[in-house]
């Protein structure tokens, strides 16, 4: 029967071996890929993907050529669970093995959950500055903000990944279509003609005076792309104009549609928080008489109106702030010691490796005891 | 080997697995969605001081980081919201409705070059383009902050007439960034305000806090520096163990590859080049013999053994100790002559490897500069 054949396939040890060999090849190829792609891109393309794709130079299409990290991880998990479910019978003698396998499954699932759901971002604060959001360290978003109501702004944030696909973007909050005419994932802007630059064909906002060019994507971990896009706003009565939006432009550009005022800005993706942090002071302590760093710490004011919480917190190396499901680490600082950079990690699966290790250790102890106790009893009776 | 399970034995396990995997896959796809936020605005928070907490801080956005420069505002000037490319803008009112604008724009790199920009201003003032020589004669020396710069006074046709346009433009290169300072407006008013503009330029103080490249706050510099994901070091600062050294002017720093601390390129117009790189390893880094043989292999030479080593190496005085010096000549993969000069500097429990390698003529010319570079390096862990 077909279903039985499928189950036999998924429970086979041969599949385990094939998957492990494929994983080995993937890790090898991914490691080599880092040479040209850089760590971040190689991780994304080889390990944080279902397939590794091949794209000929200049082509817009790509084809999957090898299973990616997610695919192999999931297949191994499926293989482990199905083999376990089909072969192991539940008995007191094997309870330890059950616990060990449960721990392994939790470990793999936890890592998958971390990879898919964990969000890392950064919060850069100057002394005295307050923010209620952190920012992605490399992904952008097009923020279309309704500024009409001075008391309540509505932000429609379109992620860079959608802009890259170009075409029309519609949202119920917007009385117009955002048409992405061109998108450069990494770009340069200038105010006048220079080699390789072409006029940005924008007819509204700051774009008409600017020239732009596409540049290769950044692959180094410590640099990021600065995207730009040509965006047309199309209302039911017709086009309202074409704007050049860019990460290079710090100021939003405003326009009016349907009697309401909107702003357009391509900026780092933001993650809003239900509380705010204000940097009271950043300390950079050194060992006396030397420039050798001793401690970095950020004294912050945490304010949460919905609970009335209002207190000072101190974040320093190895002492992050864990609050509201997020962890704020001391990550970097400004050269003048008047600003701090906090790494903000939100990882719903952060407990799973701990639980998995406890399960595996418990399983091993139980399995050991389940053999030791009968052995001792047997010896005593004999 | 394995028995095929019947469906009645483990249906729940398979259903559960399928549901679980589907959930994970679908949840992961949600990252590409358009997000909508509603943010209540309360200006009181941005005005509050650290000791006076905001009333409704959760819904407000942070104050922008201070601009990367400070100034003394001339009397009569009003600061206005900066434009898209500028980081500071001012309005200068005159009599009879005359007006002038002042803007400060930083752009990375050469930003098109001086003459192209000055000619752009000339076109704006209705004047024909000028040659670089002519522009050179027009330039007036001014001071921008603590550094000299050139001012171009571009008066449109009919200068002195209140309707004519006049532009005062200053371009200054500073740490890989081109700064544009411009006053434009009514010719009579701009003439009157020229001393105030010059005084404004002199009063500028460039702070190190924000990137002076026009980049978004927190963005790494485009010249290879940067603080994103950086270790606990200020951007541009030397690492805790990185030596302080003086780099010859004609060495061009390039992004260092993995395992290297720093890398410089010395290129000639005819396409020949040589590279200088520095690496640091703990302990003895594999020892002198292994490294000399590694370098010999890079220029097509056979390895030597310990007994030949003394003939190939020399001793070099460096700050805080002695270095092992090697000078090798070989060929590259195409048979072209190559020369490699290198120094191994043991310092405390670390070893520093300096290497100059490339075209034979360039290496011969740069050898003295390289020697000085190695000898004058100062180490944090020097005795």
Image (cartoon, coloured by chain):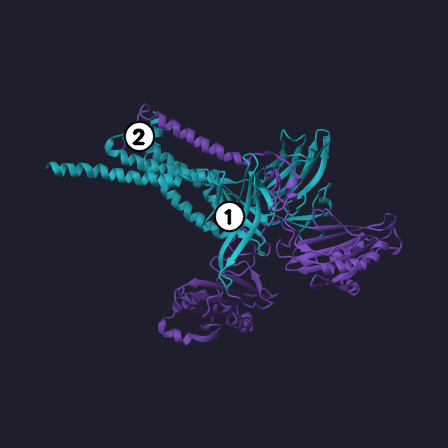
Chain colours: A cyan, B purple
Judging by the rendered image, the residue that carries numbered circle 1 is A314
Residue drawn at point x = 42 percent, y = 31 percent: B20
Residue drawn at point x = 60 percent, y = 44 percent: A130
Above or below, comparing residue B266 to residue A69 in the picture = below
Residues at marks 2 and 1 touching, judged by CB atoms closer than 8 Å: no
Residue A336 image position (x, y, % from top left) = 59, 56
User: Which quadrant is the C terminus of chain B positioned in?
Assistant: bottom left
Picture quadrant where residue B33 is located = top right
Q: Are marks 2 and 1 on the same chain?
A: yes
Left or right for A367, reference B116:
left
Judging by the rendered image, the residue that carries numbered circle 2 is A86
Above or below, comparing residue B66 to residue A18 in the picture = below
Precedes in sequence: disc 2 or disc 1: 2
Badge 2, how many Cα within 10 Å: few under 14, some, many 20+? Answer: many
Please report, as a chain letter, where disc 1 is located. Answer: A
User: Which quadrant is the N terminus of chain B positioned in?
Assistant: top left
The single residue placed furthest to the top in the displayed view is B8
Using the numbered discs, state the Cα–Cα distance from disc 2 to disc 1 in whole angstroms. Answer: 52 Å
Q: Which mark is residue A7?
A: none
Q: Nearer the viewer, residue B41 or B158?
A: B41
Q: Could one spot residue A59 in this view of the protein?
A: no
Left or right for B183, reference A302:
right
Picture quadrant where residue A365 is located = top left
Above or below, comparing residue A190 to residue B364 in the picture = above
Residue A59 image position (x, y, % from top left) = 56, 43
Tag 1 secondary structure: strand
């Amino acid at each position: 029967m077909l279903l039985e054949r499928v189950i036999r396939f998924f429970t086979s040890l041969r599949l385990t071996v094939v998957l492990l060999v494929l994983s080995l090849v993937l890790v090898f190829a991914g490691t080599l890929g880092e040479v040209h792609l850089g760590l971040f891109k190689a991780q994304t393309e080889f390990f944080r993907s279902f397939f590794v794709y091949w794209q000929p130079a200049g082509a817009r299409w790509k084809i999957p050529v090898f299973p990616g990290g997610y695919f192999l991880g999931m297949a191994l998990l499926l293989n482990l669970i199905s083999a376990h479910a089909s072969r192991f019978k539940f008995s007191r003698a094997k309870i330890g093995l059950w616990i060990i396998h449960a721990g392994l499954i939790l470990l793999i699932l936890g890592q998958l959950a971390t990879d898919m759901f964990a969000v890392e971002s950064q919060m850069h604060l100057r002394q005295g500055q307050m923010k209620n959001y952190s920012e992605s360290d490399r992904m952008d978003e097009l923020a279309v903000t309704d500024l009409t109501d001075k008391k309540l702004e509505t932000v429609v944030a379109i992620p860079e990944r959608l802009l890259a696909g170009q075409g029309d973007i519609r949202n119920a909050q917007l009385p117009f279509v955002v048409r992405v005419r061109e998108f450069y994932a990494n770009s340069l802007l200038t105010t006048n003609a220079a080699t390789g630059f072409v006029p940005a064909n924008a007819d509204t906002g700051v774009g008409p005076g600017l020239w732009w060019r596409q540049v290769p994507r950044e692959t180094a971990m410590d640099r990021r792309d600065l995207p730009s896009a040509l965006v047309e706003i199309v209302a039911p009565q017709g086009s309202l104009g074409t704007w050049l939006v860019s990460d290079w432009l710090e100021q939003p550009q405003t326009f009016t549609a349907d009697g309401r005022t909107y702003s357009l800005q391509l900026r780092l993706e933001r993650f809003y928080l239900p509380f705010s942090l204000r940097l009271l002071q950043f300390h950079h302590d050194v060992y006396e008489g030397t420039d050798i760093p001793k401690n970095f710490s950020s004294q912050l004011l945490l304010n949460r109106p919905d609970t009335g919480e209002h207190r000072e917190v101190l974040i320093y190396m190895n002492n992050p702030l864990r609050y509201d499901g997020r962890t704020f680490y001391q990550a970097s600082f400004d050269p003048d010691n008047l600003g701090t950079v906090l790494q903000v990690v939100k990882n719903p699966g952060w407990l799973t490796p701990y639980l998995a290790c406890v399960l595996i250790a418990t399983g091993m102890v139980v399995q050991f005891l389940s053999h030791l106790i009968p052995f001792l009893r047997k010896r005593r009776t004999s | 080997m394995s028995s095929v399970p019947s469906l009645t034995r483990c249906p729940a396990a398979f259903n559960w697995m399928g549901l679980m995997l589907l959930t994970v896959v679908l949840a992961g796809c949600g990252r590409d969605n358009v997000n909508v936020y509603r943010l209540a605005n309360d200006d009181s928070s941005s005005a509050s001081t650290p000791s006076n907490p905001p009333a409704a801080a959760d819904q407000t956005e942070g104050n922008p980081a201070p601009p990367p420069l400070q100034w003394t505002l001339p009397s009569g000037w009003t600061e206005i919201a900066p434009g898209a490319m500028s980081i500071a803008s001012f309005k200068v009112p005159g009599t009879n409705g005359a007006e002038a604008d002042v803007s400060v724009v930083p752009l990375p790199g050469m930003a098109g070059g001086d003459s192209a920009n000055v000619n752009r201003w000339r076109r704006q003032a209705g004047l024909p383009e000028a040659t670089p020589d002519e522009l050179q004669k027009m330039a007036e020396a001014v001071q921008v902050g603590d550094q000299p710069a050139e001012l171009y006074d571009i008066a449109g046709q009919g200068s002195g007439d209140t309707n004519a346009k006049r532009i005062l433009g200053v371009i200054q290169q500073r740490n890989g960034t081109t700064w544009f300072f411009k006053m434009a407006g009514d010719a009579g008013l701009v003439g009157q305000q020229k001393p105030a503009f010059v005084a404004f330029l002199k009063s500028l103080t460039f702070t190190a806090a924000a990137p002076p490249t026009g980049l978004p706050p927190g963005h790494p510099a485009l010249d290879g520096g940067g603080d994103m994901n950086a270790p606990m070091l200020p951007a541009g600062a030397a690492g805790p163990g990185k030596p302080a050294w003086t780099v010859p002017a004609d060495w061009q720093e390039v992004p260092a590859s993995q395992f290297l601390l720093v890398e410089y390129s010395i290129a000639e117009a005819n396409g020949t080049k040589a590279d200088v790189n520095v690496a640091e390893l703990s302990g003895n880094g594999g020892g002198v013999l292994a490294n000399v043989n590694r370098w010999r292999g890079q220029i097509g030479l056979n390895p030597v053994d310990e007994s030949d080593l003394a003939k190939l190496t020399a001793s070099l005085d460096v700050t805080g100790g002695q270095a092992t010096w090697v000078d090798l000549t070989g060929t590259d993969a195409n048979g072209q002559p190559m020369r490699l000069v290198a120094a191994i500097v043991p310092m405390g429990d670390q070893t520093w490897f300096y290497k100059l390698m490339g075209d034979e003529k360039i290496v011969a010319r740069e050898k003295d500069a390289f020697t000085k570079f190695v000898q004058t390096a100062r180490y944090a862990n020097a005795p």
